[in-house]
Image (cartoon, helix red, strand yellow):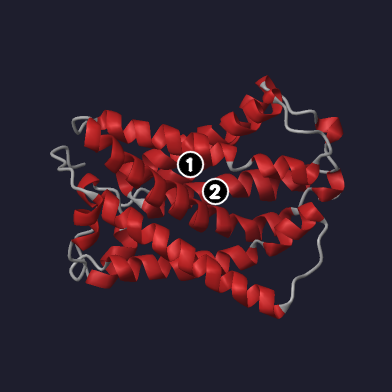
Amino acid sequence: MNETTQTVTLSEMLRQPVSERRDGSVALTLGVGGAIASLLALPYGLAMTKGTSPSTGWLLASFVANFVIISLLTWIGLRAGERFGLDSPGIRGWFVHDTKLPPSHWLSAIGLGMAAAIAAWLLQLVLPLPVDSIDIHRIPVWWQGLLASFQGGIVEEAVFRLFLVSVLAWLAARVCKPSPAIYWFAIVVAAALFGAAHLPNWSAISQVPVSRAIAASIVSANAVCGIAFGWLFWRFGLEHAIAAHFSTDIVLHVIGPLFLPHG
């Protein structure tokens, strides 16, 4: 990674030329992918909330809104992460016809994602959730989990890693000297927020309010995964974080439900 990071103001960052880097093309690609993935996750969300299928107009509006939001956030993340080596090198290389992409570590990413899923499961043995309070009928079945895994891999990594980690690193570099510490700061804080973002899922499958113990269990289990994804994003790029997140979700939301009574 580039350890000679220079800090710039937000206005300077946004004025930098993008023609050679193709940030807009990368952001739009992730925006389209994220918007499609969000629609694929709809059966998962409906299973948890016991909701009814939305209208075509709602689906169209949702697609457009997700596309705009994800594209904007990823574009900001690409600009903020440029000087830190935080990027989406695979997608960018396709647009700029770069034949000198960094080596891929797909098996390592998939393996780390599966290990993160096991670590999250073990952590919940130490900090158990009140399982008896969970409505088993609101837990999505395996195929719904499979479809939702695309949203987890693409949307959550675009937002929590490409956008949030990059922006946090950029902010940290404003007050600290460039060092690995600013990456770890960004990775850990983003992972904690990533864990907190999963708290509403508890309310969808349980009538028990979120207590401190429940919050600690949910946030910590997801944060462990978020740290693993953040490290992969830092070292190898967004695509490896997406691969790891997808493999984690396969273990937790596809394989796991197969062992449930209705799976």
Decide: is 99 above or below 215. below
**Residue placed under numbered mark 2 in the picture:** 247
| Residue 90 badge | none
108 horizontally vs 47: left or right? left
User: Does residue 150 show up?
Assistant: yes
56 horizontally vs 51: left or right? left
Type of amino acid under label 2: Ser
Q: Residue at x 62, y 44 (%)?
A: 251
Type of amino acid under label 1: Gly
Q: Nearer the viewer, residue 252 or 179?
A: 179
Instruction: State the image coordinates of residue 113 (x, y, percent, origin top left).
Output: 50, 42
Q: In the figure, residue 136 lies in which quadrant?
A: top right
Residue farthest toward the top in the current orientation of the protein: 126
Q: Earlier in the sequence, mark 1 or mark 2?
A: 1
Q: Residue at x 25, y 68 (%)?
A: 22
Q: Nearer the viewer, residue 6 or 244?
A: 6
Query: Element at badge 1?
Result: helix
Q: Residue at x 73, y 32 (%)?
A: 210
Decide: is 168 above or below 58. above
Instruction: State the image coordinates of residue 147 (x, y, percent, origin top left).
Output: 64, 61
Residues at marks 1 and 2 touching, judged by CB atoms closer than 8 Å: yes
Residue farthest toward the bottom in the current orientation of the protein: 56
Q: In the figure, residue 5 lies in which quadrant?
A: top left
**Residue placed under numbered mark 1 in the picture:** 111
Decide: is 149 above or below 202. below
174 horizontally vs 106: left or right? left
